[in-house]
Image (cartoon, rainbow, N blue to C red):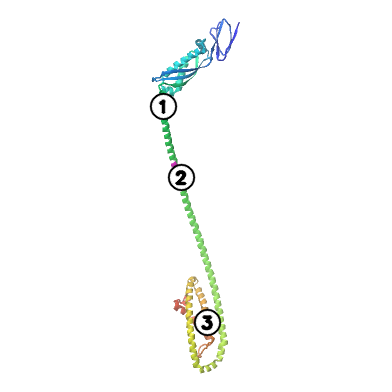
């Protein structure tokens, strides 16, 4: 009777006996087995996790420490030779026995590696330690058909406080380095901050300098432009004022010419009026006077003495009035002369026209003032010796004679020779 045997992927069938010179190894499969002539056994291919502990092992410096490692091992089912070797070593044994054999092997190699390294090397370079244990243990366990999948150093400890001292020293060193690093960082930060502040101030000063320079250039250009503008404006204003002055001067010249023409016309009118009055006087006074001349001469002789006395008295009165009026005229002329002197300063540019204007303005006033007493007299008695004019002609000549003496009076009072100034102009 034939039996059909199977196993899972974590197991391997080992069939030996009749028909096989070497055991048939079937990992995770099935096979027919003849009972009585063949034997079928199973071997586990599960991964085994081993905690490898090595307490109080002396390192190369004689410091006792305890190390705990974690290893993952298993019987390799894919490699026929290793599986055959494992079957030779562990077939028929329980998993705990296989685990114990692998554990003792790993512990021995772990202890051996610890004895060749220092505590610092084991503690600081755990990867190196794990690699050495893995390589050494793998070479021995392979001969047993067991593969070391991985090895990791789990823990390192000691009872003497050596690792703690190392930790304290390292901690102090780290703290020292941290403090130094912090101080250096603060120093670098301060330096960088100072450098940044320096750059900021330099930038600010440079910016301020550029702003000041730009402001200066702006002020210089503005001052130049303002100077040019003010110069042009002043030139325009001066040109305007000059043109206005010239215009005013032309206007004044035109006005003076108009006044001269007007004065000339007034003088012509006055001359015509004087001629008319002379003709009127001649018609009303001189002709009747000549007609009555004989009568008057006849009567004059009879009344000669009386008339002479009356004439002398009247002449004296006229002289007194004339002197008073001359004094008044002289004072008024002096005031007007002062006014005209000031006016002449302003009219220097008009020269001859101004002198003529003053004379034309003054002569009618003087003539009017001289004629005023005569026009107010109620009665005028004239005595003629037969020589010279009589009547209105005599009165007119007297007025003109007084007016002709005005320049001399002005010269005596003010020292200004009007006639000479007019001739010089």
In which image quadrant can residue 412 be found? bottom left
Bounds of the magenta span? 197-201
Does residue 46 lie above or below 384 as drawn?
above
Question: Which mark, residue 372?
Answer: 3
Point out the tag, 3 or 2, that comes first from the N-terminus: 2
- Toward the left, the furthest residue is 61
Is disc 2 placed on a helix, strand or loop? helix
- Pick the residue in front: 123 or 83: 123
Q: Quadrant of the N terminus?
A: top right
- Toward the right, the furthest residue is 1
Which residue is rendered at x = 42% and y = 28% of the image?
171
Is disc 3 placed on a helix, strand or loop? helix
Tell me the CA gap for discs 1 and 3: 143 Å
Which residue is rendered at x = 52% and y = 78% of the image?
365
Question: Which mark, residue 204?
Answer: 2
Q: Give x and y (percent) for residue 7.
A: 57, 12
Query: Is any part of residue 69 visible from this angle?
Result: yes
Which residue is rendered at x = 50% and y = 61% of the image?
235
Tell me the CA gap for discs 2 and 1: 51 Å
- The reply to whether callout 3 and callout 2 are in contact (CB within 8 Å) is no
In the rendered image, which residue does mark 1 sit on? 168
- The reply to whether callout 2 and callout 1 are in contact (CB within 8 Å) is no
Q: Give x and y (percent) for residue 326.
A: 48, 81
Q: Residues within 10 Å of mark 1 (few under 14, many from 20)?
A: few
């Amino acid at each position: 009777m034939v039996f059909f045997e199977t196993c899972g992927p974590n197991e391997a069938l080992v069939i030996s006996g009749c028909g096989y010179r070497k055991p048939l190894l079937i990992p995770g499969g099935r096979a027919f087995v003849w009972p009585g002539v063949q034997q079928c056994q199973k071997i586990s291919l599960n991964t085994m996790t081993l905690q490898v502990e090595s307490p109080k092992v002396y390192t190369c410096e004689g410091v006792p420490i305890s190390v705990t490692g974690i290893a993952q091992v298993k019987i390799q089912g894919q490699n026929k030779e290793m599986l055959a070797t494992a079957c030779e070593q562990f077939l028929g044994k329980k998993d705990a026995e296989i685990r114990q054999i692998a554990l003792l092997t790993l512990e021995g190699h772990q202890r051996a590696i610890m004895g060749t390294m220092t505590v610092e090397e084991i503690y600081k370079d755990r990867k190196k330690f794990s690699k050495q244990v893995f390589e050494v243990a793998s070479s021995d366990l392979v001969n047993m058909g067991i593969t070391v999948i991985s090895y990791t150093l789990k823990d390192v400890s000691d009872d003497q406080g050596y690792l703690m001292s190392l930790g304290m020293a390292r901690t102090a060193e780290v703290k020292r380095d941290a403090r130094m690093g912090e101080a250096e960082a603060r120093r670098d930060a301060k330096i960088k901050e100072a450098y940044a502040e320096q750059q900021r101030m330099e930038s600010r000063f440079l910016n301020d300098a550029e702003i000041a320079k730009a402001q200066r250039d702006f002020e210089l250009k503005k001052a130049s432009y303002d100077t040019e503008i003010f110069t042009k404006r002043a030139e325009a204003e001066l040109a305007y004022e000059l043109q206005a002055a010239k215009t005013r001067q032309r206007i004044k010249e035109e006005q003076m010419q108009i006044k001269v023409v007007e004065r000339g016309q007034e003088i012509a009118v006055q001359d015509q009026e004087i001629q008319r009055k002379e003709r009127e006087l001649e018609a009303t006074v001189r002709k009747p006077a000549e007609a009555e001349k004989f009568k008057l001469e006849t009567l004059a002789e009879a009344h000669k003495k009386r008339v002479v006395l009356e004439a002398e008295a009247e002449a004296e009165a006229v002289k007194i009035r004339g002197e008073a009026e001359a004094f008044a005229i002289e004072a008024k002329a002096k005031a007007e002369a002062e006014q005209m002197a000031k006016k002449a300063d302003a009219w220097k540019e008009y020269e001859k026209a101004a002198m003529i204007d003053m004379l034309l303005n003054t002569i009618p006033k003087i003539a009017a003032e001289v004629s005023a007493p005569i026009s107010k007299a109620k009665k005028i008695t004239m005595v003629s010796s037969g020589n010279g004019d009589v009547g209105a002609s005599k009165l007119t000549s007297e007025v003109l004679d007084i007016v002709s003496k005005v320049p001399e009076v002005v010269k005596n009072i003010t020292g200004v020779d009007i006639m000479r100034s007019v001739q010089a102009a």
